[in-house]
Image (tube, rainbow, N blue to C red):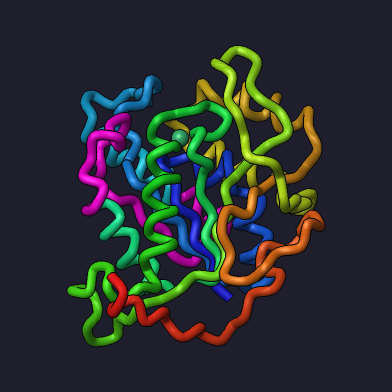
């Protein structure tokens, strides 16, 4: 089975999804994290003299974090940090659609359109881009130029937004989607913290992150945003529940536009 996680900044994979990524890797799931920016606009600069030096530093930190989380495939794209809302939507979704068609995940994780606990605009845009790519990757009439050789349309089966049962006290209020899945990460909680701390340039954020995490239940919560099959109202404890390993036949969307 394969799981893809689409984020905006190096450290999102650890802070938002780390326990779940490591848990599924341990179960034998192939995991892929795609981070849209190298995080070059961060407030914490790690001693970097300019944006490109910080970007290079953060790409390495991302790789180290993904190693701790046993991520099978980790990719940092080169979109500008802090400016995802100014990017060409069709082009970013094109990039993500191609990655989905190559990796062929059954399950995709990303932020909710509210932008996660911090409400960051890049998180919101990652959500929008990932959601469109989720829906379009399976349609042969979306980015048909990609469909040649080994690349065929691929329909992922479930899309989840990260959500939470708390908000950060010193941030503007956000409205989160209701949790429909709760993943217990007890065994991988320390790995999540360690992965976050692989982001050494962001060490100023560690105490607050760790304090918030250690004070709460060791779980990650998700909202099922889309699914190729009907869903019961029970809270899920496995993000692959109901999915199938066999490739669903891609929707013959080429006819209807
Ligand atoms: Zn972020």
Side of 89 where 129 appears, left or right: right
- Quadrant containing ligand 1: top left
Q: Position of residue 12 (x, y in %)?
A: 50, 41
| Residue 54 appears anywhere in the view | no
In the image, is residue 141 part of the stretch drawn in magenta?
Answer: no
Q: Considering depth in this image, is 208 or 160 the residue closer to the camera?
A: 160
Q: Position of residue 18 (x, y in %)?
A: 60, 48
Q: Is residue 54 above or below residue 90?
A: above
* Region of the chain picked out in magenta, as a range: 64-91
Quarter of the rendering occupied by the C terminus: bottom left
**What residue lies at 22% left-to-right and 74% top-to-bottom?**
144
| Residue 134 appears anywhere in the view | yes
Q: Position of residue 134 (x, y in %)?
A: 43, 61
**What residue lies at 49% left-to-right and 70% top-to-bottom?**
156
Side of 173 where 80 appears, left or right: left
Q: Position of residue 61 (x, y in %)?
A: 42, 43
Corner quadrant of residue 120: top left
């Amino acid at each position: 089975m394969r799981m893809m996680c689409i984020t905006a900044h190096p450290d999102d994979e650890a802070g938002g999804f780390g326990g779940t990524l490591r848990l599924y890797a341990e179960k034998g799931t192939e995991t892929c994290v795609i981070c849209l920016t190298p995080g070059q606009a961060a407030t914490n600069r790690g001693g970097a003299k300019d944006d490109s030096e910080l970007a290079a530093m953060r790409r390495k930190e991302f790789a180290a974090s993904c190693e701790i989380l046993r991520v099978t495939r980790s990719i940092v794209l080169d979109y500008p940090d802090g400016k995802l809302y100014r990017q060409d939507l069709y082009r970013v979704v094109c990039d993500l659609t191609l990655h989905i068609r190559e990796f062929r995940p059954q399950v995709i994780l990303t932020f909710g359109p509210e932008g996660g606990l911090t409400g960051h605009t890049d998180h919101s845009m990652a959500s929008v881009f990932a959601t469109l790519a989720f829906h379009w990757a399976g349609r042969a009439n979306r980015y048909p130029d990609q469909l040649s050789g080994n690349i065929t349309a691929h329909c992922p089966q479930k899309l989840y937004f990260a959500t939470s049962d708390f908000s950060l006290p010193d941030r503007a209020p956000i409205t989160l989607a209701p949790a429909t899945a709760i993943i217990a990460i007890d065994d991988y909680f320390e790995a999540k913290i360690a992965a976050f701390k692989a982001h050494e340039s962001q060490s100023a954020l560690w105490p607050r992150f760790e304090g918030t995490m250690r004070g709460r239940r060791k779980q990650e919560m998700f909202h099922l945003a889309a699914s190729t099959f009907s869903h019961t109202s029970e809270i899920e404890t496995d993000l692959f529940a109901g999915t199938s390993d066999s490739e669903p036949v891609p929707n013959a969307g080429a006819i209807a536009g």
